Image (cartoon, rainbow, N blue to C red):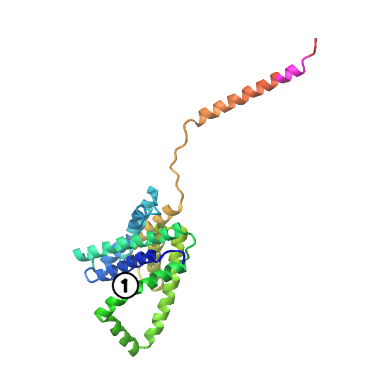
Amino acid sequence: MVNPWKTYWKLSAVLMGSHGLTKGSLAFLNYPAQIMFKSTKVLPVMVMGAFIPGLRRKYPFHEYISALLLVIGLILFTLADAQTSPNFSIIGVLMICGALIMDSLMGNLQEAIFTMNPNTTQIEVLFCSTVVGLPFLIPPMILTGELFKAWKSCAQHPYVYGVLVFEAMATFIGQISVLSLIAIFGAATTAMITTARKAVTLLLSYMIFTKPLTEQHGTGLLLIAMGIILKMVPIDFKPASRSAPRNRKSHLKEEKTQADRREGEGDEEHRPLV
């Protein structure tokens, strides 16, 4: 370990708050409404990056436009074939907004850990935050009785153990990949990648199961593509200097003066002696 335990206590608390508020909000919001809010994750991640100590990251204006296009496109695409309209509740909206704040804190805290201590490995962050998270989860599971219910259910259906092992392995690979992206490219770019990944997953499901694509699907995909392209293309807004032609003219005049001087010196050297 190269980081103190208190760093991972903070990270685990934020992680638990994010997952708990996200899952709990489903008791007050339907799935389309939750998708709308969770699709905007990249925007609070970019804003929160300016307030994290040791990071203080600022983004150019075109990257905010890119993120906004990506968010709107994903919302349009995911809600194109929703069977029900988004259902909003004040408690649910507050919970999902809290989850978004926790998500933005989590990504930027992870980036700050890698930035302030470059020797930090992805394995350390994943292992320590998971180990520290156990004390947060076990007491409420015991108090609510969920731990004993889950234990009995697994004993009655042993195949669940195999499913849990497979899910743990898949989660490990996914988390290591996300942490590697954060360490290399930053929290905002990682949030954009994971947001675009949702659209790719949905598009593949439509291609595999041959679902019909509507005009709203096409509009959403177009906005997503525009956001990704705007993010990838480097944009330089620096205007050209107006004094460049004047400087060029002065440079040519100086060269001509030096050439005349050299010709004059040459004439003096070849002048006959009297």
The magenta stretch is 265-271
Crowding at label 1, few (<14), some or many (≥20) Cα neighbours within 10 Å? some
State the image quarter where residue 216 is shown. Answer: bottom left
Tell whether position 266 is magenta. Answer: yes
> Is residue 210 visible from the viewing direction of this image?
no
Q: Which of 177 and 87 is in front in this view?
A: 177
Residue 143 x, y percent position in the rendering: 25, 79
Q: Residue furthest bottom?
A: 156
State the image quarter where residue 239 is shown. Answer: top left
Q: Which amino acid does label 1 sit on?
A: Phe
- Residue at 32 percent of width and 67 percent of height: 13
State the image quarter where residue 67 is shown. Answer: bottom left
Image vertical order of residue 274 relative to residue 84, above or below: above
Is residue 274 toward the left or the right of residue 38 in the image? right
Residue 99 x, y percent position in the rendering: 29, 64
Tell whether position 115 is magenta. Answer: no
Is residue 100 toward the left or the right of residue 239 in the image? left
Q: Residue furthest left?
A: 90
Give SS at disc 1: helix
Image vertical order of residue 212 relative to residue 247, above or below: below
Is residue 133 toward the left or the right of residue 118 in the image? left
Is residue 217 toward the left or the right of residue 124 in the image? left
Q: Which of 268 and 105 is in front in this view?
A: 105
Residue 118 x, y percent position in the rendering: 48, 59
> Number of marks in the image?
1
Residue 28 x, y percent position in the rendering: 21, 69
Q: Name the residue under label 1.
A: 136
